[in-house]
Amino acid sequence: MVHERVMEKLAILSDAAKYDVSCSSGQSNRKNKDKGLGNSSGSGICHSYTEDGRCVALLKILLTNHCIFDCAYCVSRKSNDVKRAAFTVQEVVDLTIGFYRRNYIEGLFLSSGIFDNPDFTMERLVRIAKKLRLEHNFNGYIHLKAIPGASDELLKEAGMYADRLSVNVEMPTEQSLKLLAPEKNHIDVIKPMHYLKNQIAGHKEERKSNYKAPVFAPAGQSTQMVIGATKESDLEILGMADYFYQQMNMRRVYYSGYVPISYDNRLPSIGTPVPIIRENRLYQADWLIRYYGFNVNEIVGFDQPNLDLDIDPKLGWALRNLNQFPVDINVADLELIKRIPGIGFLSARKIVAARKFKKLTAPDLQKMGIAYSRAQYFLAFASPFQLQKDFTAIQIKDHILDSQKSKYKNDFSNQLSLFGA
């Protein structure tokens, strides 16, 4: 009977957790020690792939879907007529250890609705992580949701046991948060981000002089924005993300396409498609900002505030800046090569390394695995530089679109079920 009740809770609370996408493992490096359980060294969590090809996953659940708030975009809002459940601290600990021993998971992602008050909820999340670490010597990955409004003391304790902490901003702007979650305050989200940023930086500095000093959230902090529920442009969304990266040292910003779940005139109607392609374009733009040296205003601007859904953001930038092409990859610097459509971050480095030994040609690039059918319109291999043909931006775009098929489908669910179909 007890087992059946726990499994019923698991079905409810794992399903409710699927709307939170901010659950990557980051770069935590927690070692196995004292013959304990698991480790998070070099492993991705939540349907990620390690370098050796292994797919790894985590137990992704809510502690409870009871909530004192009535956020219009949230399936767990207090006014929603859904089946409610709540785990005890020990039940989450037992599930995590049990699933780990069965090799179902390699870590835990734990979020929660807010029952009673933020400290009451946060204290239980911390207690779960603490019991796993200290009582079961569990060294696997743990990602805890940092509850806005919780005390600094609880946030600090959470960082001592969790690999990553996340405070979800939810809405891209303060105005949207007030519209859809009038009980919440934007500053309550930003304040713990500042606190976690300072704690992470302080502990890193301390470990430089004392390697025995405790680690604090070694995989950093992340956040999530719901997109498509309100009318923010991609310029506003990416501007907020850039603020988090620059001012909060955020490890990742996640973008979650809004899934219509409410009959509410403030929100898209039920049946409105989830903006999966837009979500993907935002991730691509985010990647350009973090790893390719792009400025937000190079990708989107006041004259074009939204990303082109037909093509990726790097191709969009290149087509708007044809005056910078063609590029001779045998002499161009690394930063410019990274901006060529079809050439990725690692491929650009391979090109710079390989050209030390020979003059690279088109077949050489194709052997490196670059998307040559795309890159060819932006490359030159001899002087004077000439494109294969004097194509316009529209012609290049049409040629590339004709040569590829969209991989996106109207599908939603990056949460695997723990139960059979």
Image: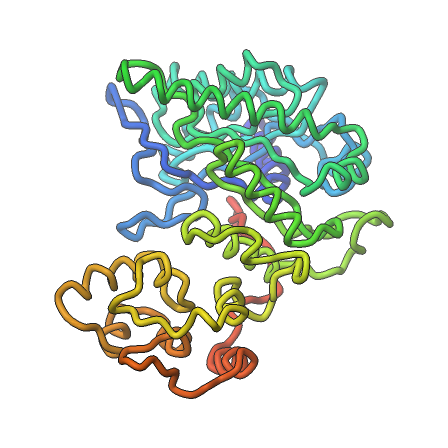
Q: Is residue 321 left or right of residue 134?
A: right
Q: Residue at x 66, y 45 (%)?
A: 226
Q: Residue at x 30, y 35 (%)?
A: 41
In the image, farthest residue toward the front: 384
Q: Quadrant of residue 169?
A: top right
Using the image as rendered, state which of residue 335 and residue 145 is in the foreground.
335
Residue 187 position in % (x across, y down):
69, 26
Comparing 1 with 190, the one in front is 190
Which residue is depicted at the point 37% across and 61% down?
A: 336
- The quadrant of the rendering that contains the N terminus is top right
Is residue 139 at all visible to an observer of this figure?
yes
Residue at 53% across / 62% down in the picture? Answer: 313
x and y percentages locating residue 174 in the rendered image: 73, 36
Nearest the eye: 120 or 254: 254
The x and y percentages for residue 53 are: 30, 53
Q: Residue furthest bottom?
A: 389
